[in-house]
Amino acid sequence: MFGLFNKGPKASARHILVSDEATCLDLKAQIEGGADFAKVAAEHSSCPSGKQGGNLGEFTQGQMVKEFDEVVFRDALNQVHGPIQTQFGYHLIEITARSE
């Protein structure tokens, strides 16, 4: 019974959510230039997870919106991906772990 909720791929990620693509691109450039992802998330993300450096913890495939899920379960680990547009705004996503 307990295993029913743990089936399928899992991932851990952190993200930064902002309202427009230009801001998202600027923040990505800052991070790629050496700025700390967690600090940028804490200062700029409109998601409550920003207070934890954007950390979303572990989640299973299908828990997040489609556009977010596709990146997390397809793209390279430990790189900043985005901007990814969802119904919530524009995201920068860093996938920190993934398992089948």
Image (cartoon, rainbow, N blue to C red):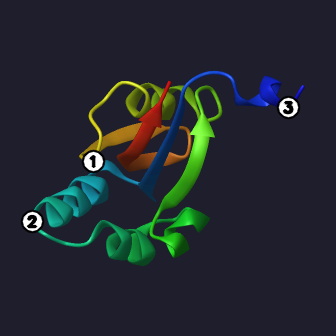
Going 45% across and 69% down the picture, which residue do you hit? 53
Q: Quadrant of residue 87?
A: top right
Disc 3 to disc 1: CB gap under 8 Å: no
Going 58% across and 46% down the picture, which residue do you hit? 58
Is residue 47 among what the camera can see? yes
Which tag is nearer the camera, tag 3 or tag 1? Answer: 3
From the top left corner, tell me how far across and down residue 50 is, in percent. 50, 68
- Residue at image mark 3: 2
Count of number-bearing discs: 3
Q: In which quarter of the image is residue 77?
A: top left
Measure the alpha-carbon separation of dots 3 and 2: 44 Å
Going 58% across and 32% down the picture, which residue do you hit? 65
Measure the alpha-carbon separation of dots 2 and 1: 15 Å
User: Which amino acid type is shown beneath numbered disc 2?
Assistant: Gly
- Residue at image mark 1: 78
Which tag is nearer the camera, tag 2 or tag 1? Answer: 1
Q: Indicate left or right for 89 with 20 as reference.
A: right
In this rendered view, identify the residue nearer to me: 30 or 4: 4
Q: In which quarter of the image is residue 36?
A: bottom left
Going 43% across and 54% down the picture, which residue do you hit? 15
Q: In this view, does 50 lie above or below 61?
A: below
User: Which amino acid type is shown beneath numbered disc 1?
Assistant: Asn
Q: Indicate left or right for 92 with 29 as reference.
A: right
The mark found on residue 33 in the picture is 2
At mark 3, the secondary structure is helix
